[in-house]
Amino acid sequence: MADMSLKKTPVAEQDPKVRARNFDEVTLGYTAEQAMQEAERCLNCKNRPCMQGCPVGVRIPEFIEKVREGDFAAAYDIIKSTNSLPAVCGRVCPQENQCEGKCVRGIKGEPVGIGRLERFCADYMADKQVQTEKPEPNGHKAAVIGAGPSGLTCAGDLAKLGYDVTVFEAFHTAGGVLSYGIPEFRLPKAIVAAEVENLKKAGVKIMTDMVIGKVFSIDELYDKGYEAVFIGSGAGLPRFMGIEGETLVGVYSANEYLTRINLMKAYKDDHPTPIKNSRSVAVVGGGNVAMDAARSAMRLGAEHVYIVYRRSMEELPARREEVNHAVEEGVEFLTLRNPKAVIGDDEGRVRALECIEMKLGEPDESGRRKPEAVEGSEFELECDTVIMALGTSPNPMLRATTPGLDTDRRGCLVVDENEMTTKDGVFAGGDAVTGAATVILAMGAGKKAAQSIDAYIKGKE
Amino acid sequence: MFRIVRKERLNQAVVLFEIEAPFIAAKARAGQFVIVRANEQGERVPFTIADYDAERGTITIIIQVIGGTTMELDRLGVGDCIKDVAGPLGVATEYGDAKRVAVVGGGVGCAIAYPQAKELTKLGAEVDMIAGFRNKDIIILENEMRAVSKELHICTDDGSYGTKGFVTDKLEELFNLGKKFDLVIAIGPVIMMKFICAVTKKYGIKTIVSLNPIMIDGTGMCGCCRVTVGGKVRYACVEGPDFDGHQVDFDELIRRNGAYKEHEKDHVCRLTGGVRNG
């Protein structure tokens, strides 16, 4: 009989007051006992609704069964057979919208802590020698552009099928958003590096410092013998508001702010990349990236960190868990406020953010109540740093240098149901196709593209 | 890893590195840049490509040793490797159908003004170069510049060599002598480019400047390098680094390039290592 308690087995977290000033991981993960206890809550349903919620098709009840038995290595193998990055997914997937959102236990009470269990298995195996089988080479070559979640997943799956896969990464480090975007305190970079190392052991080649579109065009990759190409170049281009003062010193895009911290490690003394020593920070936006930027600013020692968001707390697009963590850590939420201008001092540095109060009117086409400015309610929010976390658009570099690659009006690559672009043999997935979305959706697309690439190449034989 | 095959000290503080980077060398064109990371902890710093040789598979960068990254690089010698070199980034210089061109370089900026003159001469344009330095001791690439220009005018601030005075004065003098140019290319400290543009605007001559904002990724991802050109925000890394000098907000660029001055004071100015900060 399953454990019928309505709550998930609690997981330890760093104390909010302490963690708000360090970059160590917030959530500490299950012990073996806790994991086995949580595994008891799984009903092992016949129709496996949780699996329908998983874009990479992890056989969830099967791995949980193994956790319940205490056979963690077997559990890990089951996860790993369909998911190339389990330690990552266990930490950053929005499980409430994916597997856990479909869990029967969630109808009355909390769903099974699938994410926590996945993380536990990956962490348990992290220091164990994992035997990686290298499959028989099938004699075919495929290229992957971008070593982010979609590219790594696609490459991992192709390698499993025996392909000779090379991933071309523009940065000096693989990982994409896992390395430059998601902060250390949510996803330690050593874990990303270990997952990348696992892929290399499985035969994936990774070439860093390779800006495709500049150093090679996609057509040149074909000349080099690659038979298919997957584009997972992400949604690189940060958006600004187009208001006055956005080029003042102290205005960052969230991408820049987070890249300085996560990829370049500006918070560490032995890394020379600088970052502003801020006293008071206004983060504009209400998504997960805004929460990451705000919580990072807190850890760098700011006295005040504000989230400025034009709708109310209910409409915040960030995950509830991220919002709660930010609140616990002392981030101040200025909802129903919208920036009008960034105000500078005589030296061109940020002095304040001029905002206006908003109220919610009738629902708009998205179904959310439309924020409207309250006339005459302008005020100045004193701050020395403004971080724009307003989303990103796909990087135009590849489409500008690749004839035949169609994009939609937002600049996103157009793909068919098999993730193939309008250029024969070129596939794409992740944010380059969808615009800014989640790690797991990008991984799902990479997985599907790997199957399509396999079918495409085999179909030509 | 990118092996150094040649290292030459051009003056006390300016060093040339020829680096094995065959993929970049095959694609590079005048005006483009690379992002360099000296070592595992290093920051990402842009350097304009000073020369490239597809056959040898090498590119050349010329750096002024004034900050942390450039000091790290200067510690490396022939046979050593630079951790990361990514490129060629940015848009290559577009000369249009310019036939008579004045190329103006300031300080270490001459290191990338020179390849522009070389490229233009190769394309059949007639090139005059004006090269400015603080004094005689820090003059670089004199013979090379002379070889690719019809006339080379060297100016020094203190008059210890060539003409005493600024490059702006020399350019204005050439205009007054009735010299006709259909394009001016100015590369050097931001303040120099600003004043050159003030002169050429008066004479209505198109002027290309190569901007040197702070960058991180160099591929349009972070927006750190945004500059205001013609009232619009542009990303120097993907839309530049060349822009129409008459449209650039140079004062803003100077302010933005000073964003980490305090940080530099703490940690041996490790930020401004670009070739173009002469």
Image (cartoon, rainbow, N blue to C red):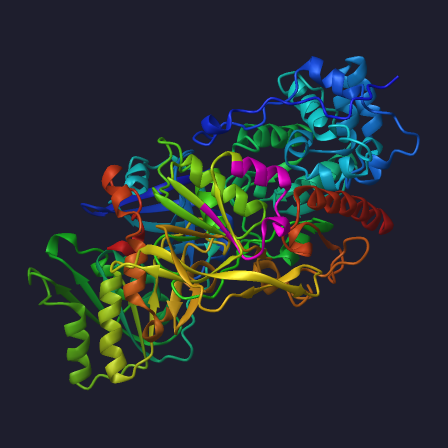
Confirm whether residue B30 shows in the render. no
Q: In the figure, A184 relative to A32: above or below?
A: below
Which quarter of the picture shows residue B29?
Answer: bottom left
Taking B53 as reference, is A311 left or right?
A: right
Confirm whether residue A229 shows in the render. yes
For the record, the magenta segment spans A306-327
Taking A366 as reference, is B32 left or right?
A: left
Which quarter of the picture shows residue B17?
Answer: top left
- Please state the horizontal and vertical placement of residue A341, each as a whole percent of the image: 41, 63
Taking B176 as reference, is B77 left or right?
A: right
Q: What is the number of callouts on the image?
A: 0
Q: Residue at x 84, y 52 (%)?
A: A460
The quarter in which the C terminus of chain B is drawn is: bottom left
Residue A18 on the magenta span:
no
- Please state the horizontal and vertical placement of residue A27, each as a whole percent of the image: 58, 27
Q: Residue at x 75, y 16 (%)?
A: A36
Foreground residue among A131 and A419: A419
Q: In the figure, A198 relative to B180: above or below?
A: above
- Please state the horizontal and vertical placement of residue B263, each as a whole percent of the image: 28, 42
- Please state the horizontal and vertical placement of residue A208, each as a whole percent of the image: 54, 41
Which quarter of the picture shows residue B172?
Answer: bottom left
Q: Residue furthest bottom?
A: B178
Residue A309 on the magenta span:
yes
